[in-house]
Image (cartoon, rainbow, N blue to C red):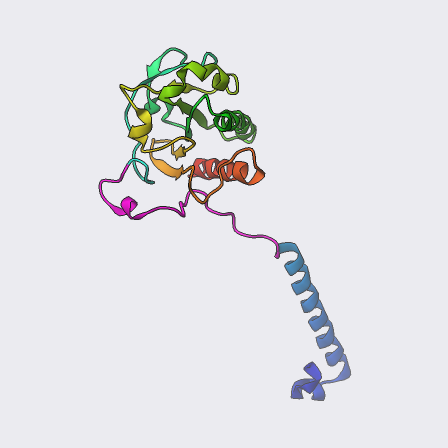
Amino acid sequence: LYLSLPYFRDAPEDAVKMKRSLCVAGWAMFILVSACGGDDEPTQNLLQDPDVGEQCQTQPLPVYCAGAMAPSFALEDIQPRSEGFQQTYGLERFTGKVTVVSLLAAWCPFCRSQAENMERMKQELLNEGVDANFVSVNSVDAYEDKDQLLARCSFPVLQDTLAVTAWDLLGGVKDDIYVYDRQGVLLRRFRATGTTNIRLSTEDGYANLKTAVKQASQR
């Protein structure tokens, strides 16, 4: 290609050799950069909800929309391994750290698996320098089965009641997961029926929630 240009046709032989070397070096650098960086892709923003609807464009924001404050309620902590065991409190107790809130039912095998994996995730994050709160709200109808859930985690488990109905206050259903920032502002609700996989027993689902928590901690 370069020999077709007038400059190269008329150039001295040494100059042509030098230009040839520069061309070869340039292509080598291009190939090297492509090989090293071609597979790098931007990390997906897991705090961006692809399922957000028009209801989250209204004011005041519904409690399940990003930007809404955590609702106020108080429930008993039934987790014997929790510092707040047998105390009655709400989500404001966790202000100061990124907080993951899950709506689980102790009678549900999937929920118990989720709790077990969240326990593992909490420890992994801590080892990576991310100190996040994890808390579950056990459904009203699952109190009798609570031990099956409590045995799979050490983080706080708040027992919902008919008098409080925290699930309703959170605007959620079983298996929903909420990620709040340090000030108690909702960053993302992972819906059980949403398009983002949050089945923590799968590699993809586990990575999705863990990445969201890490991204929240960087804000």
Q: Is residue 82 something that shows in the picture?
A: no
Q: Is residue 52 above or below residue 33?
A: above
Q: Is residue 123 left or right of residue 12?
A: left
Inspect the magenta stretch and tell me whether residue 104 lies in it: no
* Image x and y of residue 17, in percent: 76, 77
| Front-lying residue, 44 or 202 | 202
| Front-lying residue, 149 or 7 | 149
- Image quadrant occupied by the N terminus: bottom right
Q: Quadrant of residue 91?
A: top left
* Image x and y of residue 102, in percent: 42, 29
* Image x and y of residue 186, in percent: 35, 36
- Image quadrant occupied by the C terminus: top left
Residue sitting at 24 percent across and 45 percent down? Answer: 58
Q: Quadrant of residue 134?
A: top left
Residue sitting at 66 percent across and 88 percent down? Answer: 6
Q: Is residue 127 above or below residue 78?
A: below
Q: Is residue 58 left or right of residue 218?
A: left
Looking at the image, which residue sits at the far left?
Answer: 59
Q: Is residue 14 left or right of residue 29?
A: right
Residues in magenta, as a range: 38-62
Q: Is residue 188 something that shows in the picture?
A: yes
Give the dominant element type of the magenta stretch: helix, strand or loop: loop
Q: Is residue 54 above or below residue 213?
A: below
Inspect the magenta stretch and tell me whether residue 50 lies in it: yes
